[in-house]
């Protein structure tokens, strides 16, 4: 009778049922927290990568801008022709450095989240750069020559008077030397004015080129991060789907075991209700036979 009562009450199954319910709740809670934490981590890592890469692209452009501006300020007439190829080479290097930085940063993000690194969908493109506007300055050159000639004439007169003052017989020599000195100064003024103008043009051209490169680099950063976000989010969704299926299978197993316990408990209760009355009647009969109307002590 005690065994039937215990089986019908399910006392031996109650502890196991409580453990299964707790395990089921732990699985569901862990599943929700894991999904939420990974989603937040992905968004945070990508946002951080976007900020850091944008800062890196701007810094590289600014650094190269200072480097090329310094080179432009000390150019000589013979080195002007080699300046444009150098600028184009540095631009290509900046694009490659930014691309390498993007790839490394996104690889770190993927590794941190235990995901595969998303490849670049398109290769980096070096922005188109127009040639520096070193145009012919005929009228400006003429004006500079006139001013330089005036300056040279003044120098020539000073030299002629100096020679005449030192030796009156050397007036002709003074005129020749003064003319040569004036001509040299005229050529020097015209040349230095043209060189300074070309340096200024190249400096402004470098600024325009770096602005284009910086915009292209920032656009590349935004595009790569966006593509990576799509790819990593897709991988994360697939992982969540797999883990959800695994968790659902474990929960289904637990639910099946709980149902089995419930069925067994219901059967035991039915068996108890069926078997206890005859046993109770048998006990009463034994008591009556042994003790009559006297209660069992």
Image (spheres, grey):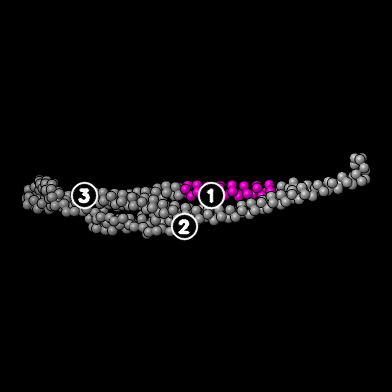
- Graded by Cα atoms within 10 Å as few (under 14), some (14 to 19) or many (20 or more), the crowding at tag 1 reads some
Residue 203 x/y as whole percent: 26, 49
Residue 102 in sight from this viewpoint: no
Q: Nearer the viewer, residue 140 or 234?
A: 234
Q: Which range is magenta?
A: 17-45
Residue 54, percent from left and from top: 39, 49
Any magenta on residue 273? no
Element assignment for label 3: helix
Which quadrant is home to the C terminus?
A: top right
Q: Identify the residue position indicated by label 3 in the image.
A: 197
Q: Residue at x 49, y 55 (%)?
A: 235
Left or right: where 119 falls relative to 261:
left
Residue that badge 2 annotates: 117
**Which mark lies nearer to you, 3 or 1?**
1
Closest to the camera, between mark 2 and mark 3, is 2
Residue 269 position within the rendered picture, expressed as x and y whole percent measured from the top left: 74, 48
């Amino acid at each position: 009778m005690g065994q039937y009562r215990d089986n019908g009450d399910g006392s031996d199954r109650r502890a196991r049922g409580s453990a299964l319910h707790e395990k089921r709740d732990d699985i569901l809670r862990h599943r929700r927290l894991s999904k939420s934490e990974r989603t937040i981590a992905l968004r945070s890592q990508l946002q951080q990568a976007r900020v850091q890469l944008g800062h890196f692209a701007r810094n590289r452009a600014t650094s190269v801008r200072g480097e090329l501006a310094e080179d432009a300020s000390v150019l000589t007439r013979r080195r002007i022709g080699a300046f444009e190829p150098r600028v184009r080479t540095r631009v290509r290097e900046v694009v490659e450095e930014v691309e390498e930085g993007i790839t490394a940063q996104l690889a770190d993000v993927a590794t941190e989240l235990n995901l595969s690194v998303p490849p670049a969908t398109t290769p980096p493109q070096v922005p188109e750069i127009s040639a520096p506007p070193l145009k012919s300055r005929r009228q400006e050159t003429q004006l500079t020559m006139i001013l330089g000639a005036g300056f040279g004439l003044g120098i020539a007169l000073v030299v002629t008077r100096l020679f005449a003052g030192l030796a009156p017989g050397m007036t002709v020599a003074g005129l020749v030397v003064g003319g040569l000195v004036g001509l040299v100064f005229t050529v020097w003024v015209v040349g230095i004015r043209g060189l300074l103008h070309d340096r200024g043009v190249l400096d402004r051209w470098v600024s325009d080129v770096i602005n284009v490169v910086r915009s292209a680099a920032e656009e590349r950063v935004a595009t790569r991060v966006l593509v990576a976000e799509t790819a990593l989010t897709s991988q994360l969704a697939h992982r969540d789907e797999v883990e959800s299926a695994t968790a659902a299978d474990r929960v289904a197993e637990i639910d099946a075991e709980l149902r089995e316990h419930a069925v067994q408990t219901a059967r035991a209760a039915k068996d108890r209700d069926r078997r206890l009355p005859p046993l109770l009647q048998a006990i009463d009969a034994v008591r009556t036979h042994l003790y009559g109307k006297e209660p069992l002590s």
